[in-house]
Amino acid sequence: MARIWATTLRGRVTLIAAAVATLVLVPAGVAGAALARSLSAAEVWTENRDTAALVTGMIRGGDLAGDVLRLKNTDPTTLVQVVTADGTVVAATPAAQRLSRLSDVWPAASDRVVNTTACPSFGCLHLTALRESTRPDSLVVYVAQPTPSILAGRAVDLVIAIQVVLLTALITWIAWLLAGRTLRPVNQIRAQLDDINATDPGRRVVEPSGEDEIAKLARSINGTLARLEYAAEQQRRFASDASHELRTPLAGLRAQLEGAQLYPEDTDIAELVDDALKDTDRVEAIITDLLLLARIGSRVDIVKERLDLGELVRKTLLDRTGPVPITATLADGVFVEGVRFQLDRLLANLLDNAERHADTSIGVELTAAGDEAVLSLENDGAPIPEHERERIFERFTRLDSARSRGAGGTGLGLAIAREVAVAHRGSLRVAGDARFELRLPLAPPLPS
């Protein structure tokens, strides 16, 4: 049974609770029994000493008359004898008169009280011997009571053992119920995960209210499911985009090669090679951008470092030799945590887009606002229509060719830029006519 219980967390918790209860209650029961015996024995010794002190007081006061001791307020079962130095019983209570000397114990002058036990033929006794004085011929008073049942038998042990068993069983049952109630949400989450895995990966587990460990676990699971769904969607989109977008340049390349094969004498080899290389470059660019999008979505690059965003922008601007002048206003000490090459690619894509659509100038501004770094890029080209300001971040989206200075890129630049921003827990949006605004969380300050 223990092996079966140990296969479940609920069973293991219950077994641990039962073991702890046993380890605590058994020693407590043993100590309790010992304490009960000790207190009972101490009470008997105290009563015996009090009775013996009463009798010695009577002896010293000359109140001992005859050989029969009649003590008031004394249990009739208490046996009292007064014995001389030669072992003669000179006085006794009625119950002890017909008995022989209760004990051979003789207290010394230096230790006038002796507590002991004896078991004559009529039963076991708890006996106290009190020496009346230190004189050599001093009398000794013996007071004995029948040994209490709590000391004579094992009734106390049995009662305490039953209590320990019952308490251990009760604690085990309560632990079983509490563990079941505590783990019920976990079992529900597991069942929901099994159902999600078998039916609809887009579903989420129910998140319990509160801030306990199970509620946090459910939120973490939903976050993981969302990330997995997003990564899977990125892979599906990669396959779809690759098959769709690569078809055109490959078809053009194939057509040129087939034409050259059919009409070799009419083919300009240099022009053919030049066109083929252009198509190949486009295919390579599309594949590179699609792979980058897939990597960002699946979090392949998760090693982040503390970066000075202002320095990163300055370096990107120094490496550019575009035809449109760029003015930059960059605040110092704006640090973020990120993947360097991804942020480089984000900045390059935004600048490429600005150069493609600017007329005469591009402005770049970096500030810190609250707990965010805010980077703005604005060009003086044609404004972006409001209804197009979200669509331009979709893959392979191009607006009216009149806005573009050149042939354009792969159609993935702004999509990559937004994916990088989101992967860095930030945002990228169109905040004006032709103004892009990037917001990234500031890196926490370094410990002093």
Image (tube, rainbow, N blue to C red):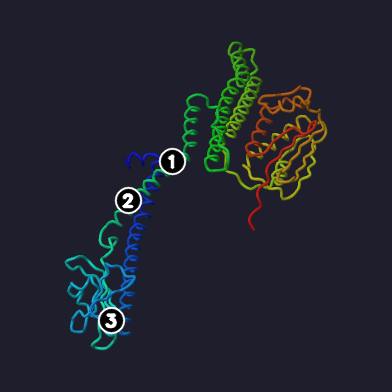
Residue type (three-letter) at the residue carrying disc 3: Leu
Count of picture labels: 3
Q: Closer to the observer: label 1 or label 2?
A: 2
Q: Closer to the observer: label 2 or label 3?
A: 3
The one of 345 and 336 positioned closer to us in this rendering = 336
Residue 249 in the image: state x and y as whole percent.
63, 20
- Residue 64 tag number: 3
Residue 300 in the image: state x and y as whole percent.
55, 37
Distance from the alpha carbon under mark 1 to that under mark 2 = 23 Å
Q: Is residue 226 above or below residue 443?
A: above
Q: Is residue 14 left or right of residue 369?
A: left
* Label 1: which secondary element: helix
Residue type (three-letter) at the residue carrying disc 2: Ile
Q: Are marks 1 and 2 in contact (CB under 8 Å)?
A: no
Distance from the alpha carbon under mark 1 to that under mark 3 = 70 Å
Tell me what residue is drawn at x 30 percent, y 76 percent. 52
Q: Closer to the observer: label 1 or label 3?
A: 3
Where is mark 1, residue-wise? 177
Tell me what residue is drawn at x 75 percent, y 32 percent. 430
Q: Is residue 158 above or below residue 238?
A: below
Where is mark 2, residue-wise? 162
Residue 260 in the image: state x and y as whole percent.
61, 14
